[in-house]
Image: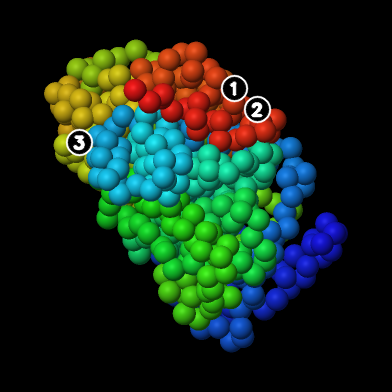
Amino acid sequence: MPFTDRRTILRAAATLPVFAGLTSATASAQATSTEPQKPAAAPSAAPPHVTRILAHYIVTARYDELPDNVRKEGVRTLLNWVGVAIGGSRHQTVDIAASALAPFSGPHQASLFGRRERFDIMNAAFINGVSSHIFDYDDTHLKTIIHPAGPVASAILALSEMQPVSGKDFLNALVLGVETECRIGNAVYPNHYDVGWHITGTAGVFGAAAAVGKLLGLDEQQMVWALGLAASQPVGLRESFGSMNKSFNPGRAASNGIFAALLAAKNYTSSDGMIEAKRGWANTISTKQDYREITEGLGQRYEAALNTYKPFACGIVLHPAIDAAIQLRVEQKFTADQVKRIELKVHPLVLELTGKKTPQEGLEGKFSIYHAVAVALIEGAGGEKQFSDRAVRDPAVIELRGKVVPVIDPSIKPEQVEMAIELNDGRVLKKRVEHAIGSLEKPMSDKDLDRKFTDLAGGILPKEQTAKVMELCWNVEGLADAGEIARMGSRPAA
């Protein structure tokens, strides 16, 4: 279909009827709101054919249509994801997953980052997805708190080792997968998240299915079925946060997405309206359904361009407080033994997500505002080492986190914090952060991402190999075989 015809169809799709009772607030306000919302009104007319509209876009979208800034963000997304996947590869969680699944793996089709083992593509995608999320150091779409790359990149890199995929096709699939999951996430956030679903897993499976389906060359009907089969596999609950189970969710979303696309490629059918139907995905697992978020502006505005990257290895709501703590430490040059009290004004979501007062393990520390502030003040950092078992059990950190007093203030936005540190000599040091480093307003630079990657890969890959993997990621668009990234990022068999 000619490019102009496809645009005409997509614009026309936006005029189809949507649910009655949708608010007139902007999409941005809907996506960033964290306040409970009332259940959506019952539909007075059939919703638009969302699943098919989305499938048509995915199937027909071309690499040469991607704006330069979207391509660049896709490359940065890839680089950041590969770095965190390598960095997490030696964690106990990954050891357990590889050991548990090895006896049941099929052909050795795909690599594991930072490791020697090879697995079939679905198990490799799962384990790499776990590895990339275990430190909670991966990318974040701030409007939905989705970690987009985990489900998508894990799936298509595994596939790229099984069949040849050019770098341009790979990058196009990556962007389309991220776009798919974030748009679907926008349609149901925050209500879907508020009731307990881990949206990275539940929306991520759509991104993985779309991206893999794109590389498999699915036609429109097959892509409809792939999205439908993805809808049947929501995975992830917020109760898992602070345990190994949290990283299971993007890993499983990746393998479930491959599963859906492979079945659809053989004409395994599903409903044609699995996203929007009365008993479909959106109505079943959320009280909010804004289908305009999925269909409006396809190919014109890109959620994939809004991806962000973490300078701190923990939940995104902790970043403003860590940033404030490090800034005060650098500016005022005080020590932990001088601190009497640390008061924080925070958004209610901070304590809801990170209210663990006495974390016992590093994974729990990633969801503790008390630990995050204390360790940042003592060590002047918030990387992987600051959220290790060693860090959460450090007596000095334990003592200082007892002096951290978070205060809920609804006037404070999720991206803000007000910190006041009272010292023993009576001085009070204050810092307000409007946007933490790593946000859209204060993004990490390419050099920041390079340093993060190098730090994560240190001790896992030799320096020369690390440099080669980074070069492959930065130059993915020129690769004849994108699978080279995964092979270079693994360790040779013993």
- The residue under label 2 is 475
Against 491, residue 408 (above or below) is below
The three-letter amino acid code for the residue at tag 1 is Glu
Farthest bottom residue? 44
Quarter the C terminus occupies: top left
Residue 212 seen in render: yes
Coordinates of residue 426 in the picture (x, y in percent): 25, 21
Q: Position of residue 26 (x, y in %)?
A: 62, 60
Q: CA distance from mark 1 to mark 3?
A: 35 Å
Q: Are marks 1 and 3 in contact (CB under 8 Å)?
A: no
Which of the labelled discs sits on residue 361, or is there none?
Answer: 3
Q: Amino acid at mark 3?
A: Glu
Mark number, residue 266: none
Q: Name which of mark 3 and mark 2 comes first in the sequence.
A: 3
Q: Which mark is residue 471?
A: 1
Q: CA distance from mark 1 to mark 2?
A: 6 Å
| First in residue order: circle 1 vs circle 3 | 3
